[in-house]
Structures are given as structure tokens and as C-alpha cells.
Image: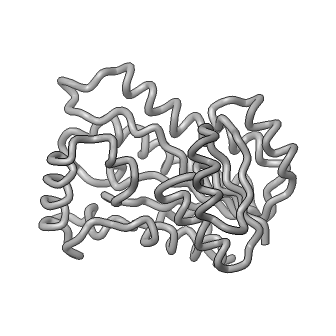
Amino acid sequence: MKVIVIGGSSGIGEAVARMFVQSEAEVIIAGRNRERLEAALQRLAGAHGEIMDAASPESAARFFERTGHCDHLIFTASGGRGAGSIASVSIDDIKSGFEAKLFAQLTSLKAALPFVGQSITLISAATAAAAMPGTVGLAAINGAVESMVRPLAVELAPIRVNAVRPGVVDTPWWNGVPKEYKETVFRQTSSALPVKRVGKPDDVAAAVFMIANNGFITGTIVDVSGGATLAR
């Protein structure tokens, strides 16, 4: 089995890559930052890595021409911009969020089509389905990602297309925010969620692994948010 993980140099993507490496799959991770990519490959003994800008049609085309056929293609890259109340959020930040996530996934997916054999898995986020103040931009971005899943599953059949919807997950992304803010968000999230904790990258990776290996799942969005999207 050959698996390509776009955005596999940290966080959820690295956890996904590790799970497939442990299952003895051939794993290739792709990322834009060479330093982070090389550091991830040190931690992922047995995986291979390639530099790629997922938002660039030329870079994506060269990447898939080099790597060739794969059984499973998994998108975990995300820009992370677009958060904030509608009164305060920058439209430019929302546009940047769309470019880094939705359009990067679309760009890479188009380049990958001649090379994918079995499944494509996208990553959205719980903001697509939960009514959380301050997430209108993120809801638009992730809702757009999720809206592609069903038509793609029909259009690309028999290739299976699914998405995983994570909630708040403790990844290196949170290292870029003030420590006090992270602690507050994690404490409040843990208190509010039915599972009483924030997520771990392995929680999401396990869902991705299951989807890729289950040949009877397509057109589905798997919620891995700890209950964040449940009405309460």
C-alpha cells in the first residue's frame, strides 16, 4: 500500500503518516517548509518526503509526476487563518484561509487525479457544523471543504472520497498563540465536551486510517470532535 499525506510534517498529518508507517505502508509526506519536513522525517523512520506547495498547480503537478501512483491520498494541510467575529475578522484573512485550505486541496486534488487508485480523504473541522461565535470565517472555509465530499464521491467513483471533521486538537499549531489563551481554550473546551478532554492527533489519525482501509465507505464525513457538534 502506498500513501501520500499532504501536510504530513506536523500535527495531525504527522500522526496520520506515523500510523500508516506502523502498518508497513509506503508513506510519502509533502510540505512547503524543508526544515519542518526534514525534522518530521527524522521522527518518521521509514517515511519519505518531498517539498511541495499544495496551492501551486505547477508544484503539485511536479510532485505527483515524481511520486507516481498512490493507493490513498490524504490532505491535512491548513492555513489556520480566518478566525474572529464577523465584526472584527479581516476579509483578507478569510480569503487567505480559503487559499491555504480549500483552494490548496482543490489544486492538489486536480493534479493527483491521474495517480490515485483507491481513496481520497480531506480534513475539515468542527466549525463547519457547530455554531461557535468567532468562527464564521472558519465555518465558511470548512463548510466549503465538506460540501465537496458527496459530489466528488460520485464524480470520481470508484475512487472513494471522504472527510474527517476534527474538533479542538492539541497540535503544534497552538504553539503560535499565547500560552494563557491556549490554556483557557483547552480548559473551557474540556469542560464543555461530552468526552471531557481536547483531542489528540492520534484520535484524528485513527479515523483517517479507518476510512482509507474500509472499502465500503465513501461520500461520508466522520466527526472526530469529542461531541463539539452535538446540540446542547
Residue 193 drawn above or below residue 37: below
Q: Is residue 164 left or right of residue 55?
A: left
In this rendering, does residue 25 appear at all?
yes
In this rendering, does residue 154 appear at all?
no
Q: Is residue 202 left or right of residue 182?
A: right
The N terminus lies in quadrant? bottom right
The C terminus lies in quadrant? bottom left
Foreground of the two, 57 or 220:
57
Q: How many marks?
A: 0
User: Where does the image place residue 108, in percent across and percent down from the top left?
Assistant: 69, 41
Residue at the image position 28 percent from the left and 61 percent from the top: 229
Foreground of the two, 149 or 182:
182
Residue at the image position 38 percent from the left and 34 percent from the top: 81
Foreground of the two, 37 or 27:
37
Foreground of the two, 150 or 215:
215
Tell me which colouring the rendered structure shows: one colour
User: Where does the image place residue 11, in percent across and percent down from the top left?
Assistant: 47, 56
User: Where does the image place residue 138, in percent across and percent down from the top left?
Assistant: 35, 40
Q: Is residue 225 left or right of residue 189?
A: right
Residue at the image position 77 percent from the left and 40 percent from the top: 111
Q: Is residue 164 left or right of residue 112?
A: left
Residue at the image position 74 percent from the left and 62 percent from the top: 159
User: Where does the image place residue 73, in percent across and percent down from the top left?
Assistant: 69, 57
Residue 30 drawn above or below residue 158: above
